[in-house]
Amino acid sequence: MSPMTIAGIVLGVIFLGALLGVVLRANLPGHHVEESSKDSVRLVMGLIATMSALVLGLLIASAKSSYDTQSGELVHLAADVIQLDRILAHYGPESLPARARFRDTVERSIDRIWPHGGGRSVSLGLPGDKNESADFYALISHLQPQTSAQRFAQARALEIGAELSRTRVLMSEQTGSSIAWPFLVVLVFWLAILFMGFGMFAPANATVLAALFVGALSVAGAVFLILELDQPYEGLMRLPSAVLRNALAQIGP
């Protein structure tokens, strides 16, 4: 399900809990809503509110950390792309086939991660053609350096190529969710109980219902942001392709 759908479900569950509290208030015996009873329930609600805040903060921190990590990997990847092409350029004209192959590989990677139009889904997986990277390495390995500078450039190009491959594998392995779904389910349950308590001890009027709805909407918005941060290459908060496209514009024969 999309983050928007999940956030809508969270909104419905929490606000339903608030409405259930309003209904319970109208049907409970009078002594159940006396001040002594309210004090006990408020203590429990305070405990639930504290635990909910802790879990919500944990989920936000986890999603933000995952987003920042993948953003940093993308910048690192772009820097290595530019550096590798410049190293090959310094090698000499003999590296032109390898540079052309490398540019083509980068273009295809960008197209897989940020496809044009809505017909294709984002693909962070490794290329299906396993010969794609092997051919590039072969072109570099088959170079025959004549000077110490060319030997250094060849060795450095192979080293950066290996680092690029490692970063690409990391990006592929991080496609799964970093959100612990049991945490999210328990959080929504706690919030539904908390809002039910709010509804039980608040007068049933339009202002109170509006306030409860705004509160539920705010929590659902926080869940939406968490899920968006957890999918950095999709949705409204997707990482921009500009950093890698700018690198592409600087490479090639």
Image (tube, rainbow, N blue to C red):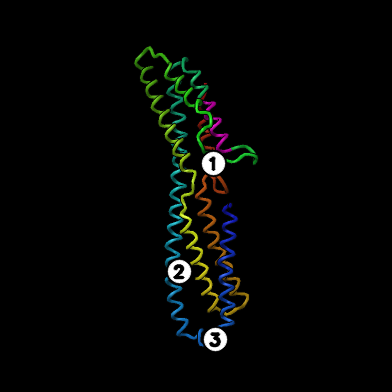
| Type of the residue with mark 2 | Ala
Q: CA distance from mark 1 to mark 2?
A: 36 Å
Say which residue appears at 53% left-offset and 31% top-offset: 128
| Type of the residue with mark 3 | Pro
Residue 170 position within the rendered picture, expressed as x and y whole percent measured from the top left: 44, 39
Q: CA distance from mark 2 to mark 3?
A: 26 Å
The label number, if any, that marks residue 240 in the structure image: 1
Q: Select label 2 or label 3 by which is in front.
A: 3
Please tell me whether residue 41 is drawn above or below residue 50 in the rendered image. Answer: below
Residue 92 position within the rendered picture, expressed as x and y whole percent measured from the top left: 44, 16
| Type of the residue with mark 1 | Pro
Please tell me whether residue 162 is drawn above or below residue 209 in the rendered image. Answer: above
Farthest residue, direction bottom: 31
Farthest residue, direction top: 146
Say which residue appears at 44% left-offset and 81% top-offset: 39
User: Is disc 1 placed on a helix, strand or loop?
Assistant: loop
Q: Identify residue for label 3.
A: 29
Crowding near the residue tagged with mark 3, few <14, some 14–19, many ≥20 C-alpha atoms within 10 Å: few
Q: Are marks 3 and 1 in contact (CB under 8 Å)?
A: no
Which mark is first along the chain, 2 or 1? 2
Please tell me whether residue 110 is drawn above or below residue 205 in the rendered image. Answer: above
Q: Which residues are magenta?
A: 102-114
Left or right, 29 with respect to 178, comes to: right
The label number, if any, that marks residue 110 in the structure image: none
Residue 217 position within the rendered picture, expressed as x and y whole percent measured from the top left: 57, 63
Say which residue appears at 60% left-offset and 71% top-offset: 210
Residue 96 position within the rendered picture, expressed as x and y whole percent measured from the top left: 50, 18
The one nearer the camera, 246 or 136, is 136
Which mark is first along the chain, 3 or 2? 3
